[in-house]
Amino acid sequence: MAQSSIEWTEMTWNPTTGCSKISAGCKYCYAEIMSKRLQAMGVEKYKDNFKVRTHQDALKIPYTWKHSKLVFVNSMSDLFHKDIPLSFIKRVFEVMNDNPQHVFQVLTKRAERLLELHTELNWTHNIWMGVSVENEKVISRIDFLRQTDARVKFLSLEPLIGPLGNLNLQKIDWVIVGGESGIKPRPMEPDWVLSIQEQCRKAKVAFFFKQWGGRSKRANGRILNGRTYDEMPEIELQKSV
C-alpha cells in the first residue's frame, strides 16, 4: 500500500505484481520499469522482478485503513492476467466486498478474461472496473467491459497513441485521457483529446484529463482549454460491516 501520485486516485494496493505485454500500450510500461528499480533496491515483493506473483499478506491491508480511501488496485500488475488463478481473484474481490467504506478502482487490458470470469465475482457498489484502450486496434475491450456486472465502468485512454473518434460510451461512467510519458514517449495530438472530450459531453460521461505526457510530464502539465478537468463518477460509500 502506498500513497499515489496518480491524479485520479489516492493510493495503490498491489495484491498481485508482475505482468506481460499484450498490446502497443504496453511498450514503455511504467510498472515494469518500477519493478526493476524496486528489485535493485532489495524490496522483497519484487525479488522476481516483473514475473506474475500473488501476495497473500497484502490481502490483509485494506482492513487496517481507518478512513475511507480511493484505491487503485494493482498499479503494478493486471488482476485478470492469465497467470493469476480465479481463486485468488475471488479472494481479492472478497476483500473489496468486505470493505464498502473504500472505493476500489480495478483496471485491465485483458477484457476478454474479465468478461469470462465476471459472473464468478461479487460486484459490490464500491468496485469500479475499467479497461485500458490506447488506440482503435483494442477498442473491442470496451464492448467486453460493457457486458460485465460492474456497477461503475470506466475507460483509461492512456497512453493515448491514436485517435478514438467513434467511441461507444453506452453504460460507461467515466473516461480518463492521458498522453505517454518517459524517455521516448509517443505523441498525443490535441485533436484526439478534444474529440474524446466532446464525445463524453454528448454522452454525459465524466471526463478526466490526466496529463499531456512527454519527456517531462510535469512541465507539460494537464491544462486543457485553459483549465483542468477532474470529473469523476459520484462516489457511494458505506460504513464497514
Image (cartoon, helix red, strand yellow):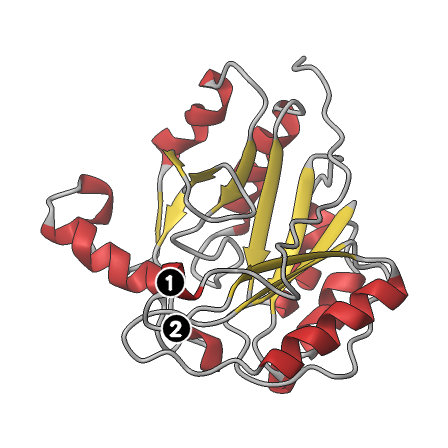
Is 161 placed above or below 73 here? below
Front-most of residues 140 and 6: 6
Q: Which residue is mark 1?
A: 219
Packing grade of label 2 (10 A; few <14, some 14-19, many >=20) is many
**Contact (Cβ within 8 Å) of mark 1 with mark 2:** yes
* Coordinates of residue 206 in the picture (x, y in percent): 76, 54
Task: Say what amino acid the circle numbered 2 marks.
Answer: Gly
Instruction: Assign a secondary structure to mark 2.
Output: loop
Rendered location of residue 200, percent (x, y): 80, 65
Circle 1: residue type:
Ala
Q: Is residue 150 above or below residue 207?
A: above
Q: Quadrant of residue 205?
A: bottom right
Q: Is residue 47 left or right of residue 59?
A: left
Residue 23 showing in the rendered view: no
Cα gap from disc 1 to disc 2, whole angstroms: 9 Å
Earlier in the chain: of badge 1 and badge 2, it is 2
